[in-house]
Image: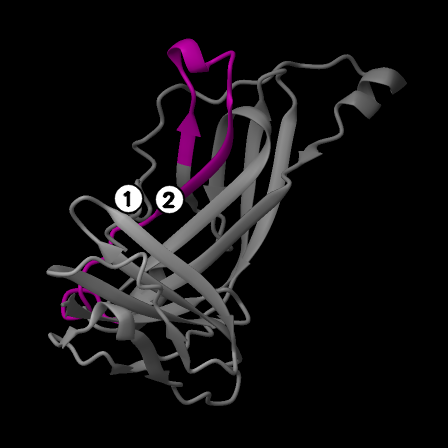
Amino acid sequence: MKRRPVQIAAGVAALVLLALGGTALAGDQTSTAASKPTRLAAATMIVEVDATAGDAGAQFFLDGEPWRSMTISGPNGRTLLTINAEGRLKGWGLTELFSETNEPPFDVVPLEKFKKRFPEGKYTFVGTTIEGEKVVGKARLSHDIPDGPEITSPADGATVARTNVVARWMAPAEPPGIDIVGYRVIVTREDPLRVYSVDLKASARSVPIPSEFLESGTEYELEIQAIEESGNQTFTTIMFEVS
């Protein structure tokens, strides 16, 4: 999770840079049709759990026509986040937005307390386009969170030949209501940053890491994510070195 470019504390509306604004439209039939809200092309809200570190974060993503303001509200109607473009971006707008909340450890904020802060249900996205029209979207957050997979190879801290690195794992249990639909394997070198990522079907239990990606005498992080049908994901990590 540390590789995400932006982190925004849960429930913080202090990112408001400019008060929400809109343009009133005339009430005739033409303007009524024109005032019909534009829908976002995409809006998602998921939970990601780090099973190794023991923490959780809520992630949100949206994509749509250029907008200058956006407010995300929870199913209880409380504002989660408000963003407004200002300065040179005011008339230019944004299209996509991805971010993730702060991730306090479970001994500070247990998972059940995290769930209360981010309740299940419909989250609404309401904003204003750069033309002053309303733009809307919605996403449903689920608390169906899988356990993390158990990484069986390489062993944590092991040194492995560059031509023989195979990521292997055991699938977590799927209690009623949990449906794992796939896995994501990510191998990362920190300095200089290089990332190898591959998405796999739910039946996968191993994948070879291309030797062309690896460099002898270098330490790597292996992350394996279990992805639930809702989009929620839980990952496990280990470190290994390449000889």
For marks 1 and 2 on the same chain, the one whose residue lies earlier in the sequence: 1
Q: Quadrant of residue 145?
A: bottom left
Location of residue 136 in the rendering, given as x and y in whole percent from the top left corner: 62, 37
Tell me if 219 is positioned left or right of 168 in this view: left
Residue 32 versus residue 187 in the image, above or below = above
Write the residue at 45% across / 37% down.
97
Q: Which residue is mark 2?
A: 99
Location of residue 1 in the rendering, given as x and y in whole percent from the top left corner: 28, 55
**Which amino acid, by three-letter code, is at mark 1?**
Gln
Between 88 and 117, the one lying in front of the other is 88
Task: Please state, as top left, top right, bottom left or bottom right, where the C terminus lies in the image.
Answer: bottom left
- Number of numbered tags placed on the structure image: 2
Write the residue at 40% across / 53% down.
59
Location of residue 239 in the rendering, given as x and y in whole percent from the top left corner: 16, 68
Between 99 and 162, the one lying in front of the other is 162
Between 75 and 142, the one lying in front of the other is 142
Write the residue at 55% across / 71% down.
229
Between 206 and 113, the one lying in front of the other is 206
Q: Which residue is mark 1?
A: 7
Q: Secondary structure at mark 1?
A: loop
Q: Which mark is residue 34?
A: none
**Which amino acid, by three-letter code, is at mark 2?**
Ser
Label 1 close to label 2 by CB (< 8 Å): yes
In magenta segment, residue 98: yes
**Is residue 119 visible from the viewing direction of this image?**
no
Tell me if 213 is positioned left or right of 182 in this view: left
Residue numbers of the magenta segment: 82-110
